[in-house]
Structure formats: C-alpha cells, structure tokens
C-alpha cells in the first residue's frame, strides 16, 4: 500500500523538527546553567558596590522629591537610557527589589549572550558552560584596571551583554547585526559600547596588516549600504549625546579642573597605569601571554572553531591597542608640562576598561576549543591521555570556581558596605556589629526625620542614601559627572571628608561653631558621626544629641542636630 504524499511529508516534518526541539532545549539548559553560575558568583545582598551609586540616582531621576537637592543625585546623567529604563521601577519596588530584578535580567541576558557567542564559534554541547566559568574566573582574578562584567545591576552589565551578542554575530560574518548590537551597548553605556566599536575597527585594521587575505575575505561579505548601518548609529547617539552635551556646557577651565580631580584624585585606580598595583600588571601580562600562545596554536586550525575564533582574537588585540594608548597617556600625564594636563584629561575615558573584558573573553573561548579537541580526540594511541588531560582541566576549573564563589560569600555584608564601612581586623563581631548599627541609625533617620532633611555623614560609608533615604552633603563614592558639580564635590570633600582621614576625632575636631556654620552653608540640619570620634573629643560637644536617645546609650554612630 502506497503512503499518501501528505502523510509522508508529515512524517518527514515531524522527524526533522524533533532534533530542532532538542537543540532548543539543550541551548536553554546551557543558558540556565550559566545563569546559575553567574548567580552563585554575584548574588550577595544588595547594594553591590555600584548599586548604591547608580540605583539611587535612577530613583531620584524618576522622583526628584526623593533626597531633594543632593549634589550627586541632582547632577547630570551619564547613562541616560539606563536611568530611564530603571527609574520607573522605583514607583512600585524598593531599591533592593529593583536591584534583584535588574540583576536577574542582566545575568540571564549575559548567560544567553555568552551561550550565543560560544556556539557561534564552537557549536558543541557543554563548552559554553566551561568557557563562561573560565571567563568569570579570569575576569575576577586577572583584571588589570578593576573592570568586572558579572555583578550588581548597572548599565555596563546590560552593555556587555550586547557586546557579547555583537561578537557572536561578527563571528558568523554578519557585521551589520553585530554593529547594531554595539550600538545598543553604546546606548546603555557609552564607554563600554564606544570602546567596543573602536576595538572592532582597530582589530580589523591589525588583521589586515598582519593577514591581508583573511581580512579581504571578510570585507567581501560586508554590506556597505549605509542605511543598513543607520540603527547602529542612531542607538550609539543615544549614549553619546547626553555626556557630550554636558561636557560642552562647561567652560574650558572648569572642564580641565574637573578632569584632574577625576583622574588624579578620585578614579586613578581605574584610569592611570601608574596607580595600578604591580601584581595586577603582572597577572594581566601573564594572561595576555597565555592568549598569544594559544592563538599561535589555533592559528593553524581551520576546523573545530579555530578559524571562527579569529575575529574574537583580533577584537581582543584591538582592545589591547586601546590600552597601549592609555599607557602612553599615563606616561605623558606624569610629565611637568602643559601637555600633561591634556593627557590627564584624556585618561578619564577608561582606556584600560575593555581589555579587562576582551582578553579573558577571548582566552576563555580559545581554551574551550582546545579542551574540546582533547575530549574528542580520535587518535587511538593518545585518546586516553588526551581525555585525562581534559578531565584534569575541567576538575581544576571547577575547584577554582568553587573557591572563588566561596571567597565572595565569606563576608555576609553587602559589597557596598564591605567597600566603605570600617573593618576591625580579626574582630569579626565588632565588624558585623558596626554594620548592624549603621543600618539601625539609618533606619531611625528614615522613620524619624523630615524627608527633605540634609545630613553631614561619615566618610567611611557609601550607603547612607540607600538605607536612610535622605540627602547628604557629600559622599566620596558619589562623584558627579559634570564639571561644575565635580568641582563643588571636591570642595566639600576637602572640608568634610579629608579631616575625617587626617585627624582621629574626625569632624569632631572642628569646634561646635564651625560645625554649625557648615550646617548653614550646606543647609544641613543633622550631623552623623562615629561614636569613636565623639569619645576622642577633649571637651564635650554642646550640640544636641538625638540618637541614641541618651549619651549613656552606646552605639557605633551618633546623630547630632545642627
């Protein structure tokens, strides 16, 4: 009996669709496992180091009555799209809930983007999980300038997700869609996306210089119709225009002064090569040498991802060329001439940022290619030995990842509080007690003071606005981005933060009259200081103590009324 044509077609369609469904399920499983790894690594209590900085600004941007008049919150927006996307969530979620929501979205997006990048180069099951874990380890332990990718909720996490998607499209010889992803990255974070553009262009220039034929084949696949690139350009302008207009609004002297403040005083550990610890330089150099060695081996491979990995390698090379310019600028900034001021101003654009992402990204994917060749060895004579080597590598990677994750969670305090609140060596009970007392005084302030009250706060903290929901005169962490506000920030830091670092009584080394004058100048009604500073005073203060309720009640922090 002859099977009807329609029935045979149905059978064929069912047969071919089943493997496709399995591939989708396997891909989703990989994305889920990568997401779990990212979450295990970064799921500390909020706020993370930068969440107390960016999410409070997003909340104020949506509701200007929250912390009104705060110098940082009222300054210009550096990541306009991120604040627009995030700010509305504060209408019905708390800051911590916004942080968790944003984290989940970001980690899932990064996991999806990484899986797509891995499969565009090495479409083999399990390799995306291995390379994602290795990337996390390399980025966390071998960075040069402190750049991280997986962490709290902020603009650059979303931007790096789009960069990963762009790299996956470029690896598939689809540069227009890759450029569109870079445009989306720039819209969320101008420096992450902007440097990705530069690294891609400079990497292809290097590819052309060293290997002309492969570069020629790449350009033959490129669509040069300008309107195809229009979405990428438009999205990039969303990220570029706000900070550009802010820079143009400042006069030359203010812009120059602000750049020097930002580069030499506030963010030198991210911007100036001379401020990088020697160990950071050594370990990043070791990672770069490892990348070059493995690239030499993969250069001879035209199968199993070797050739498709080429674009990712030259993207990393492009990021290193950006860092080399940063190295030159760092040297020029040390020279005693007028040109050094210009060089210092140029350093504020984070020349070393992208290499901290691109080099471990490229190396992690390259190692997964080598690992796959070991595990899939076909040489009968060396198959067992090769697979043993591959297994040892996987076990070592798993052990290193577990150690890294455990180390991240040894301190139960949020990472923003770890970064700023006092620590007392091996006295862990006192360290945790100070953290709990800090939250307690902030909670009391939130419940018992006016919503528009202004506070002079301790230098050793960065989460006052997060917990208390009140305006503060200045915070070392919360440096504004526009020139005028940055100069005001520096003046306030010199008056209110630096004395806390130089003198044991901190702000209590000022007289009561001077403290009241600060209160009048900055419209601050309250002064919050550590109890230890009060205890070191030679003479008791006449300021009225409002927390704790009596002077006999002891706490880590004391609140006075100015």
Image (cartoon, grey):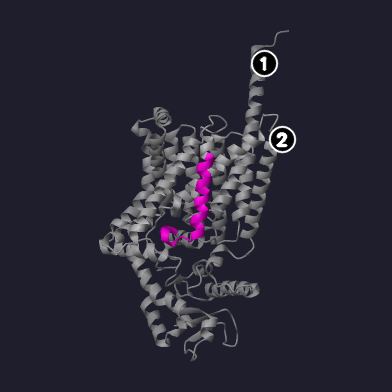
Of the pair 295 and 314, the residue shown nearer to us = 295
Residue 467 lies, in percent from the top left, at 54, 68
At a point 39% along the width and 40% down the height, the residue shown is 201
- Image coords of residue 524 (percent x, y): 42, 77
**Earlier-in-chain disc, 2 versus 1:** 1
| Residue at image coords 52%, 42% | 293
Neighbor class of circle 2 (other Cα within 10 Å; few <14, some 14-19, many 20+) is some
Q: Which residue is mark 2?
A: 384
> Which label was assigned to residue 327?
none
Residue 430, position in %: x, y? Answer: 62, 75
Outermost residue, bottom direction? 539
Depth check: give the residue in front, 222 or 369: 369
Residue located beneath label 1 in the image: 7
Mark 1: which secondary structure? Answer: helix
545 over 317 or under it: above or below = below
**In the image shown, does 526 or 308 lie closer to the viewer?**
308
Could you tell whether 30 is left or right of 192 in the image? right
For the residues marked 2 and 1, what is the alpha-carbon distance in whole angstroms? 47 Å
- Foreground residue among 464 and 496: 496
Please tell me whether residue 287 belongs to the stretch shown in magenta: yes
**Magenta region: which residues?**
270-294
Q: Residue 321: tell me if it is visible.
A: yes
């Amino acid at each position: 009996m002859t099977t009807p044509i329609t029935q045979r077609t149905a059978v064929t369609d069912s047969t071919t669709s089943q493997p496709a469904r399995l591939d989708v399920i396997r891909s989703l499983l990989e994305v889920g496992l990568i997401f779990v790894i990212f979450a295990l690594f970064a799921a500390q209590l909020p706020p993370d180091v930068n969440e107390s900085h960016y999410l409070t600004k997003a909340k104020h941007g949506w509701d200007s009555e929250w912390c009104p008049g705060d110098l940082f919150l009222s300054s210009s927006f550096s990541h306009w799209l991120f604040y627009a996307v995030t700010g509305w969530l504060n209408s019905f979620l708390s800051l911590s809930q916004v942080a968790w929501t944003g984290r989940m979205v970001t980690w899932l997006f990064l996991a999806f983007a990484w899986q797509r990048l891995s499969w565009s180069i090495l479409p083999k099951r399990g390799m995306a999980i291995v390379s994602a874990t290795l990337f996390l380890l390399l980025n966390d332990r071998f960075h040069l300038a402190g750049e991280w990718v997986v962490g709290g909720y902020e603009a650059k996490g979303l931007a790096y997700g789009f960069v990963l998607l762009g790299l996956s499209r470029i690896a598939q010889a689809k540069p227009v869609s890759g450029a569109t992803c870079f445009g989306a990255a720039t819209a969320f974070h101008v420096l992450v996306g902007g440097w990705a553009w530069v690294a891609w262009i400079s990497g292809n220039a290097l590819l052309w210089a060293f290997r002309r034929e492969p570069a020629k084949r790449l350009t033959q696949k490129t669509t040069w119709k300008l309107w195809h690139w229009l979405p990428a350009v438009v999205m990039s302008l969303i990220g570029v225009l706000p900070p550009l207009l802010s820079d143009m609004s400042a006069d030359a002297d203010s812009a120059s002064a602000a750049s020097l403040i930002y580069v030499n005083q506030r963010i030198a550990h991210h911007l100036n090569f001379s401020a990088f610890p020697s160990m950071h330089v050594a370990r990043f150099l070791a990672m770069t040498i490892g990348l070059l060695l493995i690239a030499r081996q993969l250069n001879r491979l035209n199968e199993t991802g070797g050739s498709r990995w080429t674009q990712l390698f030259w993207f990393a090379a492009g990021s290193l060329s950006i860092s080399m310019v940063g190295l030159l600028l760092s040297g020029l900034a040390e020279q005693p001439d007028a040109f050094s001021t210009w060089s210092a101003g140029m350093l504020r654009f984070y020349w070393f940022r992208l290499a901290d992402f691109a080099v471990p990204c490229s190396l992690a994917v390259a190692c997964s290619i080598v690992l796959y060749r070991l595990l899939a060895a076909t040489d009968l004579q060396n198959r067992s030995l090769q697979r043993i080597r591959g297994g040892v590598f996987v076990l070592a990677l798993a052990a290193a990842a577990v150690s890294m994750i455990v180390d991240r969670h040894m301190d139960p305090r949020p990472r923003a509080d770890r970064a700023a609140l006092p620590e007392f060596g091996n006295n862990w009970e006192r360290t945790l007690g100070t953290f709990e007392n800090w939250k307690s005084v902030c909670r009391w302030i939130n419940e018992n003071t006016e919503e528009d009250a202004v506070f002079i706060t301790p230098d050793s903290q960065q989460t006052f606005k997060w917990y208390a929901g009140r305006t503060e005169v200045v915070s070392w962490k919360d440096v504004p981005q526009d020139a005028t506000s940055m100069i005001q920030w520096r003046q306030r830091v010199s008056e209110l933060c630096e004395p806390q670092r130089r003198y044991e009584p901190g702000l209590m080394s000022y007289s009561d009259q001077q403290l009241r004058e600060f209160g009048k100048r900055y419209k601050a009604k309250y002064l919050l200081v550590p109890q230890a500073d009060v205890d070191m005073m030679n003479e008791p203060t006449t300021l009225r103590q409002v927390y704790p309720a009596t002077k006999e009640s002891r706490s880590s922090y004391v609140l006075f009324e100015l």
